[in-house]
Structure formats: structure tokens, C-alpha cells
Amino acid sequence: MKQKEKKHSTGESPLRQQVAALPFRISEGKCVEILLITSRDTGRFIIPKGWPKKGQKPTDAAAMEAYEEAGAFGKVAKKPVGSYTYWKRGDGNFERLQVLVYPLEVKKHRASWPEKGERRMAWLSTEDAALIVDEPDLASLIRNFKGPACKD
């Protein structure tokens, strides 16, 4: 299946696109908290992401990833809050991908979901979440996510 590609003005090869959810909630203290999960292969902290299925809206694909990977349900924003790039490990190779990130306000968290037990999860302040993700553009996106920051 061919994924959407973004053309670069720098003459680089176009990047294939994935979609991601940025799961968040507003805490009792009225601050934004981000839900991070670990990747299954490396254990790095990431946000739920994946490939949209043919004919699927990007927002629906982002919501599906949040459910499958983290058991999170909620309201997805219609527009992405931004994007980031990362290197995806393949069988003996790496591919640079662009990820469109859609905020998802978590309203419910299921007790059971498809990838439960395969990943760890953590609710973190925007600053803490930004510190532990590896991708600089994702860290910047999280750090700049609108809403009040949590205070220690």
C-alpha cells in the first residue's frame, strides 16, 4: 500500500507519512498531562502512531492507534498540531518517516486493549514528556502543546 508522501524543496526523497495521536488530559490541578507509551521493540517512550488504512481519515487512524496501543479513547482534533520526523527500523534498514500528530483528549481508558502488556505507559507533564522522548521535533511539539503546564 502506498502511503502519502511529502515533497521536499531541498531535493531530498519524499517522506512517507504516518499518523499519531497525542493523548492528553487536563488534571485536577488544571494542567495538561501527556500519555506516553513505550515502543515494543526498543522500549523508548513515544506516542501512539501507525499507518492509516486505505480510505481511512487521518483522525480516525490516529484515534485507532491510541486505542490499540494505549487503550485510550477520546475526542480527536480535526487538524494536526504539527509533525515530526524519525528513523524507523526495518529488517536490516532504516527509513525516515514524517508523522502528523493529532491531539486526542482522553475521556476514557479501557481496562483491556489489543496491545496491553506489550508496552508501558506514563502520564507526564508536558515538560517531563518532552524530556524523555528521543525525537527533538516531537519534544518541541509536546513542550509547545497549548494548555497550562503542570507545576511541581
Image (spheres, rainbow, N blue to C red):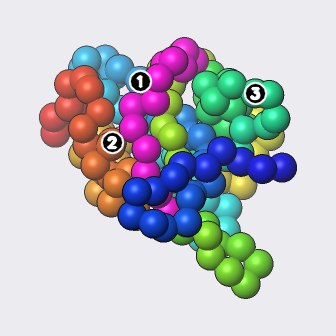
> Magenta residues, as a range?
74-86
Mark 3 belongs to which amino acid?
A: Gln
From the viewer's perspective, is residue 105 above or below residue 130?
A: above
The answer to which image quadrant residue 81 occupies is: top left
Label 1, secondary structure: give it. Answer: strand
Mark 2 belongs to which amino acid?
A: Ile
The answer to which image quadrant residue 8 occupies is: bottom left
Q: Do the residues bearing badges 3 and 1 touch, measured as CB atoms within 8 Å? A: no
From the viewer's perspective, is residue 43 above or below residue 70?
A: below
- Label annotation for residue 25: 1
Q: Residue at x 76, y 78 (%)?
A: 91
Q: Residue at x 28, y 49 (%)?
A: 140
Query: What x and y, as percent, mark residue 46?
Result: 50, 53
Residue 81 belongs to the span the image colors magenta: yes
Q: Which residue is mark 3?
A: 56
Q: Residue at x 54, y 35 (%)?
A: 21
Mark 1 belongs to which amino acid?
A: Arg
Q: Quadrant of the C terminus?
A: top left
